[in-house]
Amino acid sequence: MKANGDCYAGALRSTERAVGLRGVCGIVKRIISRSWAVASLIALACIVAACGSDGKKSEPTTRAGGVTLLGAQAYRQAIGAGEQFVVNVHVPYEGEIEGTDAFVPFDQIDQHLADLPADKDAPLYIYCRSGRMSAEATPVLQRLGYTNIIDLKGGMNAWREAGLQIVSKEPVSQ
């Protein structure tokens, strides 16, 4: 016998027992639907947390190969916290972050070793316009022995979106 549309009473033959089972089925359905709602809210909260808030503050993440990605505010704080070597790998020149030490085209890193720090374990901060060129530069830098590469997530575009200024100067080296 089928009770309440989708809950089977099985071997129950009496109407009273079927009515009692319908009540149990209703309770079970309410519990399941509430659990589903709670699970949905938890999933939504996780998605919102993963997306972040306004992009102004972001935690460091690590790209495959051990490269640290920093959001614009964290990158700004890191390069302002002492003697950091900062490299713009974007070509053609489209501006820079104040304090940039060198301009090394992402596709010519091998030819510009003299422009890079000798200490290959020291933090090496790199960026480009959008993040694509610096992502292409990192495997080359790693192959050359650099072990502590920090990349600006989203590049100068993210820097601008965070309300930070890009300056325009003539590049020192190309």
Image (spheres, grey):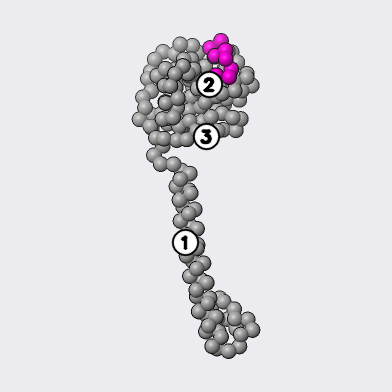
Residue 83 vertical position relative to residue 66 in the rendered view, above or below: above
Quarter of the image that includes the N terminus: bottom right
Q: Residue at x 44, y 41 (%)?
A: 52
Q: Nearer the viewer, residue 95 or 11?
A: 11
Residue 62: quarter of image: top right
The question of residue 116 being in magenta is answered with: yes
Q: Residue at x 47, y 61 (%)?
A: 37
Residue segment shown in magenta = 114-122
Sequence-wise, the earlier of marks 2 and 1 is 1
Sequence-wise, the earlier of marks 3 and 2 is 3
Is residue 94 visible to us here? no
Q: Give the distance between the C-alpha atoms of the residues marked 3 and 2, in whole angstroms.
A: 15 Å
Residue 76: quarter of image: top left
The question of residue 160 being in magenta is answered with: no
Q: Amino acid at mark 2?
A: Pro
Q: Amino acid at mark 3?
A: Thr
Q: Amino acid at mark 1?
A: Ala
Q: Residue at x 48, y 49 (%)?
A: 46
Indicate which disc residue 123 carries: 2
Element class at badge 3: strand
Give the image location of residue 80, x and y in percent.
Answer: 41, 21
Residue 49 vertical position relative to residue 133 in the rendered view, above or below: below
Q: Give the distance between the C-alpha atoms of the residues marked 1 and 3, in whole angstroms.
A: 32 Å
Q: Nearer the viewer, residue 121 or 151?
A: 121
Q: Residues within 10 Å of mark 2 (few under 14, many from 20)?
A: some
Q: Which residue is mark 1?
A: 37
Indicate which disc residue 61 carries: 3
Magenta stretch mostly in which secondary structure?
loop
Q: Is residue 77 left or right of residue 110?
A: left
